[in-house]
Image (tube, coloured by chain):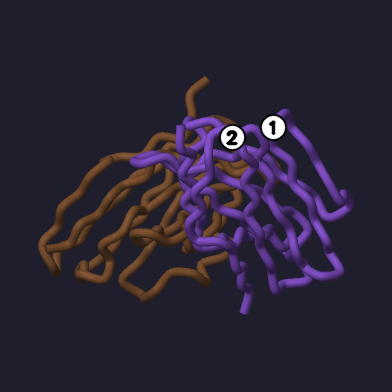
Chain colours: A purple, B brown
Amino acid sequence: GENVEQHPSTLSVQEGDSAVIKCTYSDSASNYFPWYKQELGKGPQLIIDIRSNVGEKKDQRIAVTLNKTAKHFSLHITETQPEDSAVYFCAASPLYTGGFKTIFGAGTRLFVKA
Amino acid sequence: GAGVSQSPRYKVAKRGQDVALRCDPISGHVSLFWYQQALGQGPEFLTYFQNEAQLDKSGLPSDRFFAERPEGSVSTLKIQRTQQEDSAVYLCASSLEREEYFGPGTRLTVT
């Protein structure tokens, strides 16, 4: 079935350093790849997304890359700040007849030390 | 503008009780999703509506779970005869195109 694997499960960085989270997906019909940030007691918040016809996308300190051939995609956060500390989820969304669904990774808990 | 809201935020049920969880999506959003999130895990897909039509319910774990969206707006997830393994956060999301916007979730604890 559809599966999204995410690594690492925990990541600790010093403020100002970069953080990288990597994901792989199994369903070749996936054509939309969102990334979510979830803070304690809140629902996931969309922070950036990428579609399958694009290899890279950047928004200020956040960038995502996609390798459709290898079914890999990753999130890069530069110049990390303490407020970046949260759980991050990657997801892959296949489009199928009648709609779409989103398959999430298990999450990466990011700690940014001041 | 108003985001997705869910109620109640917290629910404690005794094993065997029925519960109903409500989701108010963003106005005008055609698609609505329910997810189950266990502690320390990512959200897991339960079901999907396009307007009032339930197009995919492949993620519902058993026939004790039932969802409806009768007028294509507010949705209710009902769990009958709750079991301890139903304890989780239930998330609702709505979307107009592909981007999904999540509510804060309902934390269900079954004792």
In the displayed structure, would residue A44 be above or below residue A26?
Answer: above
* Residue drawn at x 87%, y 49% as measured from the top left: A54
User: How far from the left and from the top, in percent, is residue A87?
Assistant: 47, 48
User: How far from the left and from the top, in percent, is residue A36?
Assistant: 57, 45
Dot 1, how many residues are within 10 Å of its Cα: few (below 14), some (14-19), or many (20+)? few
Is mark 1 in CB contact (under 8 Å) with mark 2?
yes
Badge nearest the viewer, 1 or 2:
2
Q: Nearer the viewer, residue A49 or B85?
A: A49
Mark 1 residue element:
loop
Q: Earlier in the sequence, mark 1 or mark 2?
A: 1
Tell me the residue that label 1 is attached to: A61
Tell me the residue that label 2 is attached to: A80
Residue at far bottom of view:
A1
Report whether residue B71 is seen. Answer: no
Q: In which quarter of the image is the N terminus of chain A?
A: bottom right
In the displayed structure, would residue A113 be above or below residue B18?
Answer: above
* Residue drawn at x 54%, y 34% as measured from the top left: A15
In the displayed structure, would residue B47 be above or below residue B105?
Answer: below
Q: Which chain carries label 1?
A: A
Residue A66 lies in what quarter of the image? Answer: bottom right
User: How far from the left and from the top, in percent, is residue B89?
Assistant: 34, 53
